[in-house]
Image (cartoon, helix red, strand yellow):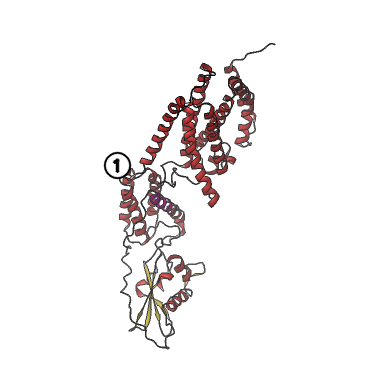
Amino acid sequence: MLTLSVPSRLVIVSCALVSAGLVLGTPRSWPLWVTTVVALIPWLPTFVAGARWNYRRHHWLVLFYVLVVTQSAHFLEHLAQMVQLHTLNLTGTAARGVFGVLDIEWVHFLWNLWVLVAAAVLLVRFRDNPWLWFTALFAGWHGLEHTYILWIYITTGVVGTPGWLSLGGAVRGGLPLQRADLHFIYNLIETVPLLIAFAWQLRQSAARPAQPKPRRAVLLPAYVGPACVVALLGSAVAASFTDPVKRLVTPDGEVVCDTFYGLVEDVRAQAMPVPEIRHTLDDIQVRTARADFNLRPALVAFVRAAREAVASYYTYPTFDALAYSDTYAHMEAHALTYETIKALSKACTLAGYPAKRRTAPVNGTVVLSPISRDPVPSTGEFRVQQPEQAVAAVEQYLAQKPWGFFGATCDAWASMHYKSDRADVGFSASANEWIVDIPRNAEALGPTVIRYHVNSQSGLTHGDAAHNLNSDFAEGCDKY
């Protein structure tokens, strides 16, 4: 029987040229994944020939071969996403790799399960392959993280969560890497040793096609080395989260978070002069280089957005999307700053630096006298006899006052920014009235406390004179 041998390099070059021709011939309107599938068609005979060659060489090698080809293709998908993100500067659905439709949590989980199971099955036969051991051990960690991500998706319905170690992750805020970047590194660490493991096994099979060694003599040398390497990698990552290492490498993490919390609270209370706001932002920027690595992206984004907000205001800067010290002309800048505040607050909390209790800032405008605590006379002449009735009278009073220019009333403003359920109510016998102090939400704007006076006999209500501010924050509700 006549056989024809073709050099493998010629086959590869021919397949590449045919693929290139097919890609050039496909319509530009076709999706990227369709064009990619068309380009892969010429490689199918080569893939099948490689599988047959490995099967003839050793039956188990065909599984090894399929694992190497599929995982390499998966790595190239991650590489394509890196090009989209960092070279083409794409975002969102445009930066999900070639087969973006498969970028879902179940696919990620099942793919890593396939790699782990295939590597474990191959270890049954190729126990003396140290590179395969490393691949299996690292794939186990990778699979555990995707199991956690899948569990979060199943229980909450949230897609694309950071998992354990990417930026914003469950372990102390994670590493300073977005999920796409971290999992690209994961797949790089899996794929390169897998390729080496396959090449190593081909050489071993060629040199000793059928010389099994005793299990105990082979298992320890092949297993211990990769296990130690994986343990060292894990220890290095774990050490990066410990307080001694963080204080040594990134000593300003806690300081910069405390400064950030104080700045936001003082600006919301209008308690910090504008030049001091700028100086504080400069200080945060200087300390960013010595802050925790996973804080730096959020810090840079906050400083940039906050400076834009401070550079464009009319009466006083604000960091919040629904603050009324400015007109709606600057609303976009406010919304961006507000989003960066949420991101940095989450990053600081996950890094172990939650907001600390501090004295509420005073803006120097509202000064209230101590609330009266006189006993309430037991008489039936009072229309308002209980503290709860006094709070209800205040709410009814505000419901009659206009808020802004959209037909809303000030009771809606108060319910958004103040906590009437935590009101401090006292009685003044000399004035024959209830005094109602309503505290502000920590994240809200305006005076720390708003005070109202309720006549105990008539129920007539009015705001304290100290609150006759007509501030931009309240759009008039604090003038009543």
Regarding residue 188, the answer to whether it shows in the image is: no
Q: Residue 327: horizontal and vertical position, in percent?
A: 44, 60
Q: Main secondary structure of the magenta part?
A: helix
How many numbered callouts? 1
Against 230, residue 55 (above or below) is above
Amino acid type for the residue under numbered disc 1: Leu
Instruction: Identify the residue at image location x=58%, y=37%.
Output: 99
Report which residue position mark 1 lands on.
248
On the image, the x and y values in percent for residue 455 come to: 40, 82
Residue 246 relative to residue 109: left or right:
left
461 or 145: nearer the viewer = 145
Residue 448: tell me if it is visible: yes
**x then y, percent, for residue 122:** 54, 29
Residue 45 horizontal/vertical position (percent):
64, 24
| Magenta span of residues | 340-355
Up-down relation of residue 179 to residue 70 (above or below): below
Quadrant holding the N terminus:
top right
Q: Is residue 466 placed above or below 432 in the rendered structure?
A: above
Within 10 Å of disc 1 (Cα), the crowding (few <14, some 14-19, many 20+) is few
Question: Element type at marker 1?
Answer: helix
Q: Is residue 352 magenta?
A: yes
